[in-house]
Amino acid sequence: MKAPLFALIAVVSALFGSTETASAQTRFKLDGEYIIVSGGPALKEWEQYRTENHQHDKWWGNFIRTARLRVQELQKMSDNKIKITWLVYKNGYVNRQDEDGDPLIDNIISVRDKYKINLVWLNTGDELINYLNTGQNRRSVKVTGFEYFGHSNKYCFCFDYSNEVLGASKVFLHQSDLSKINRKVFDRGAYCKSWGCHSGESFTSAFKRSTGVKMIGALGKTDYSDTWKMILPTISSGSGRWTN
């Protein structure tokens, strides 16, 4: 029997003002490509200069574990029929594995092998845009989902935040670069979300203007502290919320 064209997953929706925890509302086509992006972790070399409660990424795997969790959810919900490509900012993990003394790159590759997904190493913002535009034959393989796990501010995805410079990023995707994305690469019903801090304050609006596709983002900070419990990021306490 031919697989259904659409798979509809509705668990907890940010569209109705609630917070998303263990899952997310997702609509995707099984004949398209679902893209997940993981930014890199901060280095303890730099973060040691912050007060304890303001330090980032004490554990290296915040943006890897959450991406893996989404892969598991999507595969389960689609009966392993969904095509997933995982783009990972490599230099951040090369730097962190030198600091930690652990084979982090091999750990990431093991996730690829276990879940049989396509892994693409990423080192610049332009490489992300180029993959969106030409990584597949976009006339036949549309992007049906796009999710980002990593550091961000209201204007940028910050792939190497506090990895080479304390509290700053040298490698990022700024909202002014989004116009380089070919609007035709996205399926009209694509589900897009940034799980980084503050994206809903400007970046997601710029994404919609450039691509024609809505992106969910956070007003305020996101919290990865329960990642080790296999829980997706939540909005930090206070007045923050998800918005698109």
Image: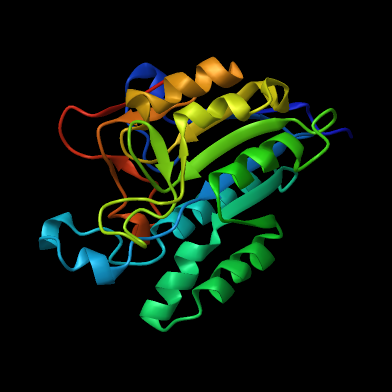
Q: Quadrant of residue 180?
A: top right
Identity of the residue drawn at 40% across and 37% down: 156
Identity of the residue drawn at 36% across and 62% down: 164
Q: Is residue 228 above or below residue 110?
A: above
Identity of the residue drawn at 14% across and 61% down: 50
Going by the picture, which residue comes out furthest to the left? 51
Going by the picture, which residue comes out furthest to the right? 1
Q: Is residue 30 left or right of residue 221?
A: right
Q: Is residue 82 above or below residue 16?
A: below
Q: Nearer the viewer, residue 78 or 43?
A: 43
Quadrant for the N terminus, please.
top right
Q: Nearer the viewer, residue 241 or 17?
A: 241
Total marks in image = 0
| Colouring style | rainbow
Q: Nearer the viewer, residue 10 or 189?
A: 189
Q: Position of residue 66 (x, y in %)?
A: 45, 53
Quadrant for the C terminus, please.
top left
Q: Position of residue 52 (x, y in %)?
A: 12, 63
Q: Is residue 124 left or right of residue 83?
A: left
Q: Quadrant of residue 92?
A: bottom left
Q: Position of residue 74 (x, y in %)?
A: 61, 43
